[in-house]
């Protein structure tokens, strides 16, 4: 059984994922223990499906505690309001968010496509004196949380745009020093859009799935980038997490120079 905790010392939600062979009744008795032992854990959710659909959501069952599962999650000194049942969020990616924030230099203009409730935008703006961070998100629920999170963290140089990157990005041509693309299943298909939003030079950090070495993702990047009329090179690669047996989530950093 794997447990993720989302929230704060005031109110947290525990999310249980069953391993093969483990039963729902085992999860239920563990959920009861969690609620009894940890006063801040107010609800326990059981993961009931894989992530699906455009908004990358999964089904959860409330197996103990309060059915209201909205929390204020705290990581690395910033706050994120969210309901794990209504939006994508992974507390396990907190370290990755810090690594990405460290790559940003002061004064940069940064675009976060597929921004969710804004964790990357906020991690960056909290850590670096950026000119602006723009997050684009298609789910109204996630976007509303992003707007709230910008206020919660008092970060006026973060902007939240509600919309599909396919419609929003063409209005942002030539603006950014850096673009982040955290949509591992299909992000690579939007590389052309990302390139168009860059200034003459810039960096794109693309997330995608690959085998252990990351080679498949780098090959996919090559295929897509060769179609575009730019100079480019891979300047970084990181295995971020295990996605499925022998499949990993990678970040590939691509330096781009317009011809
Ligand atoms: C994997 S989640 C990542 C969210 C966030 N970056 C994070 O790390 O928590 C991908 C997000 O992209 C959004 N999304 C999917 N397709 C999109 C599109 N075409 N335009 C804008 N957002 C999109 C989904 O609603 C979802 O919130």
Image (spheres, rainbow, N blue to C red):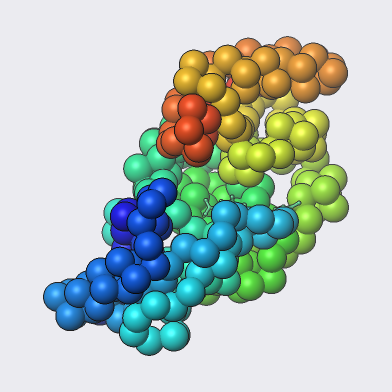
Residue 117 visible to an observer of this rendering = no
In this image, 41 relative to 246: left or right? left
Instruction: Establish if 78 lies above or below 231.
Output: below
Q: Quadrant of the N terminus?
A: bottom left
Q: Give the percent coordinates (x, y) of residue 210.
A: 57, 25
Q: How many marks?
A: 0
Residue at 60% of width from left, 33% of height from top? Answer: 208
Residue at 25% of width from left, 78% of height from top? Answer: 32
Task: In this rendered view, identify the residue nearer to me: 245 or 117.
Answer: 245
In this image, 84 relative to 170: left or right? left
Residue at 48% of width from left, 74% of height from top? Answer: 61
In this image, 27 relative to 48: left or right? left
Instruction: Establish if 51 lies above or below 37.
Output: above
In this image, 72 relative to 149: left or right? left
Task: In this rendered view, identify the residue nearer to me: 68 or 64.
Answer: 64
Task: In this rendered view, identify the residue nearer to me: 43 or 259.
Answer: 43
Q: Give the percent coordinates (x, y) of residue 70.
A: 45, 78
């Amino acid at each position: 059984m794997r447990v993720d905790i989302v929230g704060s010392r005031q109110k947290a939600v525990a999310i249980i994922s069953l391993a093969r062979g483990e039963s729902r009744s085992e999860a239920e008795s563990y959920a009861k223990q969690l609620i009894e032992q940890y006063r801040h854990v107010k609800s326990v959710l059981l993961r009931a499906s894989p992530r699906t659909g455009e908004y990358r959501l999964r089904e959860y069952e409330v197996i103990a505690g309060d059915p209201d599962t909205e929390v204020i999650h705290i990581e690395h000194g910033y706050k994120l309001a969210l309901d794990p049942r209504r939006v994508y969020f992974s507390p396990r990616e907190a370290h990755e968010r810090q690594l990405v924030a460290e790559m940003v230099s002061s004064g940069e203009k940064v675009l976060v496509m597929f921004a969710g409730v804004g964790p990357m935008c906020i991690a960056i703006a909290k850590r670096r004196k950026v000119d602006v961070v723009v997050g684009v998100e298609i789910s109204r629920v996630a976007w509303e949380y992003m707007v709230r999170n910008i206020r919660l963290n008092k970060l006026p140089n973060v902007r939240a745009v509600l919309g599909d990157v396919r419609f929003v990005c063409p209005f942002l041509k030539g603006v950014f020093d850096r673009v982040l693309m955290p949509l591992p299943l299909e992000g690579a298909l939007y590389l052309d859009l990302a390139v168009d939003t860059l200034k003459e030079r810039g960096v794109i950090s693309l997330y995608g799935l690959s085998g252990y070495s990351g080679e498949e993702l780098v090959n996919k990047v090559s295929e897509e980038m060769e179609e575009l009329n730019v100079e480019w090179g891979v300047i970084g690669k990181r295995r971020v997490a295990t996605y499925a047996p022998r499949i990993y989530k990678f970040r590939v950093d691509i330096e781009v120079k317009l011809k």
